[in-house]
Amino acid sequence: MTDRSPRRPQAFRLDDPDVVFAEEGRAAPRGAIVVTPTPAALEPTEDMPLPVPPPKASRWATLFWSGLGGLVSLGIGLAVSKLIEDLFARADWLGYVGLAFTAALVLGGLAILAREAFGLMRLKTLNDLRERAADAVAKDDRRLAEGVAQELLAVTRASPRLYRARTELSSHLDAIIDGADLVRLTERHLMAPLDAEATRLVSSAAKRVSVVTAVSPRAAVDLIFVLVTAIGLVRRLALLYGGRPGTLGMIRLFRQVIAHLAVTGGMAAGDSLIQQVVGHGLAAKLSARLGEGVVNGLLTARLGLAAIEVTRPLPFVALPAPALKDVASGLITREAKEDSA
């Protein structure tokens, strides 16, 4: 009988010198692998994630929240004013005590507002750096790339772990380097240590979520722990890459992370690691609680990877982006060994 099973296509690398693209009027060398690109092959796929722009607030929503905030502020001001008048009516010393507490409240509120504004400005700076770095690589613009490197050096100046990397990068800024290569050099020097630490943070958070949700007796406890872990993970990643998010900054970061997951299909089970878990029949071999722990750990890992993409001030150009297997492989190591036994 003739074997009619479909043959697997030949695998090759595009950077192989034996691989050439078919062109009209040009003969391919003898022994070369001729590749004819199709329009569908040139379109972006899931392996080519598109940059996610920061979500833009609606004008009507901005107008609504501005009006609501103004009314609430006027109401609080009138209430405090009436309270101070009542205190002075009872006794002068009570009025002065009320004035002192009011001054402390106003001073603290101004400090909080200043911190929130600084956090939002820093997040905007990191987003602008990422977009400008992508433009510098696409256009090979030396001046734009040098501006990105200088600004990133200023952003990371407070990080002692990058002192040696900043010194080495500063010594190369006066050299004759193309714009795209300068961005790659900046990424290798400044982002490599931070990427390693970010991968460790995401992996640790995923393992904690997996263990806690596997032994927790209540679903409400699982939900609260996962939420708290996700908030803490996003905040630590933002601080690691130079962000200083406050409450409003964290809300904006979560919006960007969710938008990134929606665009890249982050919650879909399309990664090789998830396919490996499903293919090994893990759900049939583990208890229900342990299976829930593994799934929650994988979702936390996906959230952490999206947070890295959002908080990182440079796009992944010279360095590979961390994959799910890099941060969540420990969740199924033991189960994979059991399958092979």
Image: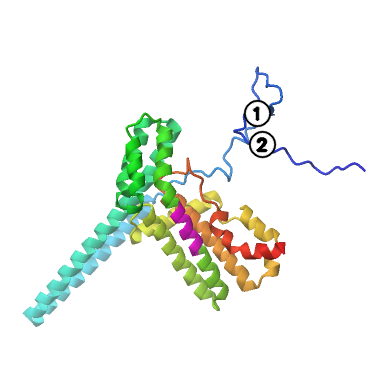
Above or below residue 202? Residue 102 is below
Residue appearing at x 65%, y 18% in the figure:
26
Give the side of residue 123 with respect to residue 13, left or right. left
- The reply to whether residue 180 is visible in this rendering is yes
Disc 2: CA contacts within 10 A as few (<14), some (14-19) or many (>=20): few
Give the side of residue 22 with respect to residue 151, left or right. right
**Distance between mark 1 and mark 2 Cα atoms:** 9 Å
Which of 257/164 is in front? 164
Mark 1 highlights which residue?
A: 18
Local secondary structure at mark 2:
loop
Q: Which residues are magenta?
A: 196-205
Q: Position of residue 269 (x, y in %)?
A: 62, 56
Residue appearing at x 65%, y 73% in the figure:
287
In the image, farthest residue toward the right: 1
Q: Position of residue 317 (x, y in %)?
A: 47, 40
Residue appearing at x 42%, y 50% in the figure:
193
Above or below residue 184? Residue 214 is below
Instruction: Give the residue type that dot 1 points to.
Output: Asp
